[in-house]
Image (spheres, helix red, strand yellow):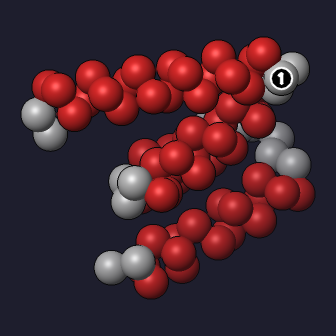
Amino acid sequence: MEAPERNRITAELKLLEILQKHKGGNAETIAFTKAEYFAEKDYGPDALQEAYSVPNPSPELSQMIKDLPLQLCESK
């Protein structure tokens, strides 16, 4: 990955985090949002890493963790 693309992704993730914090989001909400971002961009390993970064995931995040591998395989 080239530096400009990496920098763009970093900036977008920072913005997502700021927006979630502004809405009162917690660490899980931020991780969920970042995982969705990575999944949409087809960065499967990063999506999984974000989803698994939450120690005690909610039922919604647990469902995402179950669904992500299938979604990632189907998108190929």
Residue found 76% across the figure and 35% down from its top: 28
Is residue 55 visible in the rendered structure shown here?
Answer: yes
Q: Is residue 52 visible?
A: no
Quarter the C terminus occupies: bottom left
Q: Relative to 9, is 58 above or below?
A: below
Residue 8 falls left or right of residue 55: left
Tally of marks:
1
Residue placed at 40% from the left, 54% from the top? 41
Q: Nearer the viewer, residue 68 or 19?
A: 19
Residue depicted at x 52% and y 47%? 37
Quadrant of res 65: bottom right
Amino acid type, callout 1: Lys
The x and y percentages for residue 29 are 76, 35
* Crowding near the residue tagged with mark 1, few <14, some 14–19, many ≥20 C-alpha atoms within 10 Å: few
Q: Position of residue 75 (x, y in %)?
A: 41, 78
Place of residue 57 in the rendered image (x, y in percent of width and height, measured from the top left): 80, 46
Foreground residue among 17 and 50: 17
Residue 18 in which image quadrant = top right
Which sits in the foreground, 53 or 71?
71
Residue drawn where x is 68% and y is 44% of the image:
32
Instruction: Tell me the quadrant of the picture where the N terminus can be found.
Output: top left
Q: Residue furthest left?
A: 2
Disc 1 secondary structure class: loop
* 28 left or right, relative to 49: right
| On screen, residue 22 above or below 62 | above
Q: Which residue is mark 1?
A: 23
Q: Nearer the viewer, residue 60 or 5?
A: 5
